Amino acid sequence: MNKESIYGLTFEQLTAWLLEHGHKKFRASQVWDWLYVKRVTDFAEMTNVNKECLQLLADHFVIHTLEEHIKQESKDGTVKFLFRLVDGNLIETVLMKHKYGLSVCVTTQVGCNIGCSFCASGLLKKSRDLNSGEIVEQIMKVQLHLDEVGKSERVSHIVIMGIGEPFDNFQNMVDFLETVKDQKGLSIGARHITVSTSGLANKIYEFADLNLQVNLAISLHAANDELRTRIMKINKAIPIEKLMKAVDYYLEKTNRRITFEYILLRDVNDQREHATELANLIGEDRRRLAYVNLIPYNPVDEHSQYQRSTDESIRAFYDTLKKRGINCGVRLEHGTDIDAACGQLRSKQIKNA
């Protein structure tokens, strides 16, 4: 029987577990500090924790469960990791360098069932959710990489936009957020974390009610039901009107800005009329707290029906939104020379295995 990753426990859960097993509350703070501040890789390195407690932890938990399978480094400093899980499944994690710090894009599921027709990560159907420890360990593996290469840099931002639909693995994602935000450990600020969803409306309501102060991004990609259903099959179950009601609830409940992600596909959703339609959908009421992130498409061999929009089309789309008073920007690209599309490296490895 495989032992669980200790990264799967939030601080409160670790404290409760140690108390239940006869240890003092302060032990949790000691162990937490060793895990997330000193970043040890073996329980035996926790020198101020008594042997009885260390043996108990070693009997029930492991620290690391992810194995680095492939690491690719881009000319722009982006690093893509392909990790092997204990059951042999593969997941991707990406480290990106920005002017404002170091951001890590984490994966929440093995495969994806959302089925967006332009997406590489959805080429392989979901086989299981990641547990919270497997999501946390992606951050720890990246941070250990930074430590090993001798840089005094730390992971400062997180985007939950890797393989899978985060809101389809809701509780594990929430536990992950609690762990990485904890000020006694990694202390990554909530406002430095963004979670992206394809539009699971019921979970948007639940997320709003939790008031985690974490940024929310909606993968929209079209502003009418006919087109969005064609490129994102989830829209058939959760059409735009239902999605936008959930968005309105989120905006009213949190008063926080929301990002609409919009991948530009040549001659599919990138014309001026599409930009006008998007501006109309956002409307006056939502405009104050809305931001549109325009994303140039990374072509994927398996989705040859889609091509990257021209620079002229991207500029025209952007200009149309700006003239309508919509805050927007074009996403900077990272790692274009190392299978930049999410899920691309994983799918190639499995296909070639």
Image (tube, rainbow, N blue to C red):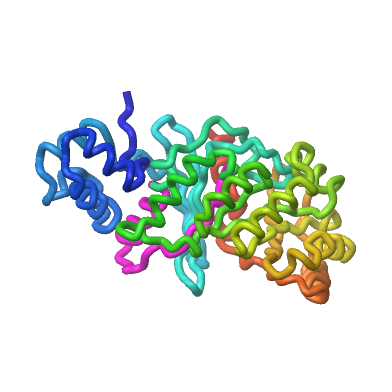
Locate the N terminus by quadrant.
top left
The answer to whether residue 183 of the structure is visible from this angle is yes
- Image location (x, y in percent) of residue 84: 43, 38
In the image shown, does 96 or 346 lie closer to the viewer?
96
The stretch drawn in magenta includes residue 197: no
Looking at the image, which residue is at 79% across and 44% down? 239
Looking at the image, which residue is at 79% across and 65% down? 310
Q: Which residues lie in the magenta part?
A: 137-164
Q: Residue furthest top?
A: 1
- Image location (x, y in percent) of residue 219: 68, 52
**Label tally:** 0
Q: Residue furthest right?
A: 273
Looking at the image, which residue is at 52% across and 43% down? 108
- Image location (x, y in percent) of residue 65: 35, 39
- Image location (x, y in percent) of residue 58: 21, 35
Q: Is residue 81 above or below residue 190?
A: above
In the image shown, does 117 or 134 lie closer to the viewer?
134
148 on left or right of 128: left
